[in-house]
Image (cartoon, rainbow, N blue to C red):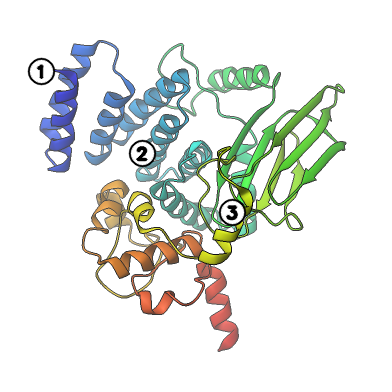
């Protein structure tokens, strides 16, 4: 059987929840290939996760991340790290779950909604376990992404956080990577965060030019070496008066405040797109949501007309949490919604920054859906 046919068969068995047969097929495929491809490793990790073999999933997902890293594929790195985070989450290791879902989000240029909502689930568990405020929670995330993630291709690691020697090896790799400027970015809904990784930036040397459609930064490090970064055509308009930057020990972080909640699919818009036309279109459309895009971004509804508070999702139901695969759960939710419900879900999800999901278009169609905690505070103040 051809490899493509074998992969299709394994995916079909997974869909039918025939995990034993799927595992046999993927093991045969691994023997056939010798060195498993990224796709095969991902399938093997998914089978292990669904079969509650969490330590095996950790091992395979990490191998998949190594392969993706060596291939230079950011979307593959993000997918593998998401599976790794899920395995730690199921093992109730919320520290590592937060670490790897945060890295997964930073490599997710397509703004995958499953990653975003799973990240919210992990954050709630982590906050509860460590009794943290939202502000301290954000500081934890910043600590994680302040250290660039590096993978070694010299061999597989069963656990990412094991011995001090492996940590020293990762530290040495990070040290070497600091010779050149590296950047990452992600769209968090109402803002876009850009991280420029350079050690020991001299904050006094930073020269920033932030305009509605472009940004430019120049700065020096402690050794007086100069760095330059610019985006000539931002994907969409920003509020230059509210956008800021902060210098940390290992990076310069830029926070761009978006003028609308439209998802950015890239930092820079294509050359044939006119900023003025886009701005006029944004003004005209306001918070309208493209239903075609909605199908690719969201994959989960309910037939009931009620809000789902994702910030509190799955906090106290540990039994259900252990038995349920987030990937499968999110996909099943979307199957029974009509067009109005899907419009309501996209609008509520995007405007609330992933914290609320409503299927009632009559309720949310004519108003802005605030983030859950903000909306709760407003309701409390009114009462």
Q: Label 1 belongs to which residue?
A: 1
Say if mark 3 contacts mark 1, CB within 8 Å. Answer: no
Q: Can you say whether 14 is above or below 242 in the image? A: above
Q: Label 2 belongs to which residue?
A: 87
Numbered disc 1: secondary structure: loop
Mark 2 residue crowding within 10 angstroms, few (<14) / some (14–19) / many (20+):
many
Closer to the chain start, of discs 3 and 1, is 1
Closer to the chain start, of discs 2 and 1, is 1
Q: Can you say whether 244 is above or below 302 in the image? A: above
Q: Can you say whether 106 is above or below 182 in the image? A: below
Nearest the viewer among 108 and 347 is 347
Q: Quadrant of residue 7?
A: top left
The Cα atoms of the two marked residues, 3 and 1, are separated by 52 Å
Disc number for residue 333: none
Q: Does 247 sit left or right of 22 as displayed?
A: right
Name the residue: 56% across, 58% down: 131
Q: Does 293 sit left or right of 27 as displayed?
A: right
Name the residue: 69% across, 25% down: 181
Nearest the viewer among 247 and 303 is 303
Disc number for residue 277: 3
The Cα atoms of the two marked residues, 2 and 1, are separated by 31 Å
The image position of residue 216, as x and y in percent, is 75, 38
Res 260 seen here: no
């Amino acid at each position: 059987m051809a490899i493509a046919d074998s992969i299709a068969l394994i995916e079909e068995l997974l869909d039918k929840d025939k995990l034993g047969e799927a595992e046999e097929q993927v093991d045969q495929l691994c023997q056939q290939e010798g060195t498993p491809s990224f796709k095969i490793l991902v399938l093997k990790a998914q089978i292990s996760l669904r079969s509650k073999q969490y330590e095996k999933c950790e091992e395979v997902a990490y191998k998949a991340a190594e392969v993706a890293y060596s291939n230079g594929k950011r979307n593959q790195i993000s997918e593998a790290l998401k599976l790794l985070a899920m395995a730690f989450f199921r093992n109730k290791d919320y520290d590592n779950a937060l670490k790897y879902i945060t890295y997964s989000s930073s490599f997710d240029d397509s703004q995958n909604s499953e990653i975003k909502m799973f990240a919210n689930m992990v954050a709630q568990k982590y906050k509860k376990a460590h009794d943290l405020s939202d502000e301290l929670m954000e500081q934890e995330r910043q600590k994680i992404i302040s250290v660039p993630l590096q993978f070694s291709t010299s061999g597989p690691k069963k656990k990412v956080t094991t011995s001090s020697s492996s940590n020293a090896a990762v530290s040495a790799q990070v040290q070497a990577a600091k010779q050149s400027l590296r950047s990452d970015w992600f769209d968090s809904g109402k803002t876009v965060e850009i991280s420029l990784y350079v050690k020991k930036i001299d904050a006094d040397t930073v020269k920033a030019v932030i305009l509605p459609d472009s940004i430019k930064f120049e700065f020096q490090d402690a050794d007086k070496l100069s760095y330059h970064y610019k985006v000539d055509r931002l994907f969409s308009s920003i509020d230059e008066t509210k956008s800021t930057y902060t210098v940390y020990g290992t990076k310069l972080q830029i926070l761009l405040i978006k003028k609308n909640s439209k998802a950015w699919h890239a930092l820079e818009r294509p050359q044939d797109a006119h900023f003025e036309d886009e701005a006029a279109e944004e003004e005209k459309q306001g918070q309208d949501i493209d239903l075609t895009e909605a199908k690719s971004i969201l994959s989960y509804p309910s037939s009931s007309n009620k809000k789902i508070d994702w910030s509190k999702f799955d906090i106290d139901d540990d039994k259900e949490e252990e038995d349920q695969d987030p990937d499968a759960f999110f996909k099943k939710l979307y199957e029974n919604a009509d067009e109005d419900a899907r419009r309501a879900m996209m609008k509520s999800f995007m405007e609330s920054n992933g914290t609320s999901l409503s299927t009632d278009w009559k309720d949310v169609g004519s108003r802005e859906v605030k983030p859950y905690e903000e909306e709760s505070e407003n309701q409390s103040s009114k009462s």
